[in-house]
Amino acid sequence: MVISASRRTDIPGFYGEWLLLRLKEGEVLFSNPFSPKRLTRLHFSPQTVEALVLWTKNPQPFLPLLPELDRLFYRYYFSFTLTGYGPDWEPGLPDTAKRIDCFRRLSDRLSPERVDWRYDPVILSGERDIRFHLEQFSRLCRQLAPYTTRCIFSFFDSYRHLGSRFLPPGEEQMKELAAGFAAIAREYRLPLVTCAEKLDLREYGIGHAACIDPEKIGRLCGRPPEMKKDAGQRPACGCAPSIDIGAYDTCLYGCTYCYGTRSLSRARCRHAAHDPACPLLEGPVPQEAIITERWAQPQAPEQLSF
């Protein structure tokens, strides 16, 4: 089993102590996003979890906890999103220079292979046009390429709660950006792949990625686990199956394009109600909750440490 922490919120950035307690205790509660009173209690251990995938935009608060995480013997890697859109679009994030420094220190601590760089999502709006993205991507490549083994990018997809503020780019715009990104990535010898994109960009040397990647996980485990495509993700997503232990409306960055936070005020209330000792991330367990017990099962026949 792979645990995803999390596509729904930034657990390393806001809930690191909670995550460590869950890993120590070997169990976590998480709710069904479509039926919040239905909870799953997942029981797991380092022997039943192939990998822990940590999604983040700012792991700085989590860095001091890494030695303790290592002592628990879980295999893990980071998926680090860094676009540098600025405070008007990403008001709750530290400035880009500080996060670049954090990226480098994390890579030095773990290894470049265990820190994926995500340039995601690519949004065209106002001054953030094609030229902006090519210049920004080039600046970031120059500073991050030595500290990672791949860059994963995707184009913006619209969500109902965002209205019409941002619109998905057209196919020609996507191809122009892809061609430019590919040329820059080649200059820095950085493999470039897309995340959940239907558009075929192989003519530019860009393949489709699996952010939760069986090959990467196999290298962490010492042998490839038997993993099929995650049927619960979008058709163009190549990720292996995982269990996400996060919760929507719990991230406080306030990114204007975010799909995971519909209400920043609700996120603040949930963050205030959060108790690291509680197995449910978003707050106290509802009295009327219906809890299903689940035990993690390894997908690899043998587990090996780093």
Image (spheres, grey):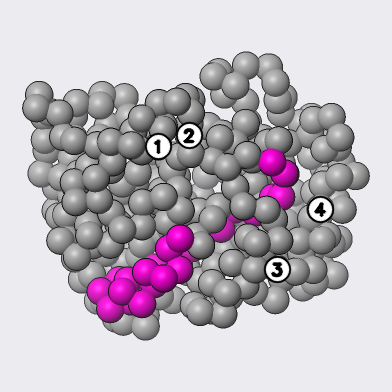
To which residue does mark 4 refer? 136
Seen at 15% across and 28% down, the residue is 286
Mark 2 belongs to which amino acid? Gly
Crowding near the residue tagged with mark 4, few <14, some 14–19, many ≥20 C-alpha atoms within 10 Å: some
Q: Please provide the residue range marked out in magenta.
A: 61-87
To which residue does mark 2 refer? 260
Q: Earlier in the sequence, mark 3 or mark 2?
A: 3
Any part of residue 39 in sight: yes
The residues tagged by marks 4 and 2 sit, at their Cα atoms, a distance apart of 24 Å
To which residue does mark 3 refer? 144
Task: From the image, state whether disc 1 or disc 3 is nearer to you.
Answer: 1
Crowding near the residue tagged with mark 1, few <14, some 14–19, many ≥20 C-alpha atoms within 10 Å: many
Mark 4 belongs to which amino acid? Gln
Q: Secondary structure at mark 3?
A: helix
Any part of residue 30 in sight: no
Crowding near the residue tagged with mark 2, few <14, some 14–19, many ≥20 C-alpha atoms within 10 Å: some
Seen at 28% across and 78% down, the residue is 71
